[in-house]
Image (cartoon, rainbow, N blue to C red):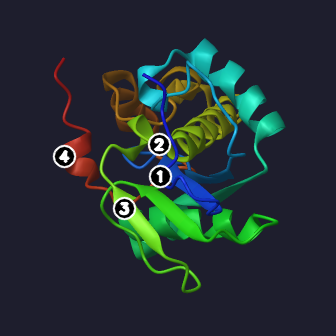
Amino acid sequence: MLLKYYSNKKTIEAGCDEAGRGCLAGPVFAAAVILPKNFKNSILNDSKKLTEKQRNELRIIIEKEALYWAIGTCSPKEIDQINILNASILSMHRALDQLHKKPELILVDGNKFKDYKNIPHHCIIKGDGKYMSIAAASILAKTHRDEFMQKIHQDFPYYDWHKNKGYPTKFHKRAIAIHGTTLHHRLTFNMTEQLKLKL
């Protein structure tokens, strides 16, 4: 089933989504995307339902064909200071800040958001599987974050970030137990619970 626009009118709508919220390491990334009204793609979907190859192929298409798109991030230090929910929302605001066109409507995946410049917004649970602009944002946020984690893996190869992308896998938690944390780790997460290993 093809995803759709939220509004059938000529409303300029920006989809927003984040990636990396449940990680132990790395920034949280968010994307904001404004697609043309005639945009169609039969593969476009929630990034979690696609293969890595599909996501990377769609990233090229979205970045080429979107009217406007932008990425925003919050660092692990910021996440520790304001918590991951606020950091996720701030990352979306930062992505919206960088759009070269002001949207008339903001569509957000999930159920939490904060007002942005008096622009109407709608929070939509599982919106990345319903609306094209949110799905496109989910793909850009995910692929840009994965790319970042691949890069920092070169400096910190013990943690397997090129595979787990900072998520709390058994290997990642074991590596923290052995090598400690890095400047890329989020220190306010409950590490005592996270480091419990089922060996």
Q: Is residue 183 in view?
A: no
Instruction: Left or right? Give the position of 65 relative to 105.
Output: right
Residue named by callout 3: 123
Query: Nearer the observer, disc 3 or disc 2?
Result: 2
Q: Which residue is drawn at 47% across and 52% down?
A: 6
Disc 3, SS: strand
Residue named by callout 1: 6
Q: Where is residue 24 in the image (x, y as percent from the top left)?
A: 41, 45
Q: How crowded is mark 1: few (under 14 residues within 10 Å), some or many (20 or more)?
A: some
What quarter of the picture does the C terminus occupy? top left
What quarter of the picture does the N terminus occupy? top left
Q: Earlier in the sequence, mark 3 or mark 2?
A: 3
Which amino acid does the dot numbered 3 rest on? Cys
Q: Which of marks 3 and 1 is nearer the N terminus?
A: 1
Q: Using the image, determine if residue 141 lies above or below residue 162.
A: below
Spatial separation of the CA atoms under disc 1 and disc 4: 40 Å
Q: Where is residue 11 in the image (x, y as percent from the top left)?
A: 61, 63
Q: Which residue is drawn at 52% across and 31% down?
A: 165
Spatial separation of the CA atoms under disc 3 and disc 4: 31 Å
Residue named by callout 4: 193
Spatial separation of the CA atoms under disc 3 and disc 2: 12 Å
Q: Residue 131: give its label.
A: 2
Which amino acid does the dot numbered 4 rest on? Glu
Q: Using the image, determine if residue 53 lies above or below residue 115.
A: above
- Residues at discs 3 and 4 in contact (Cβ within 8 Å): no
Disc 4, SS: helix
Instruction: Left or right? Give the position of 173 relative to 62.
Output: left
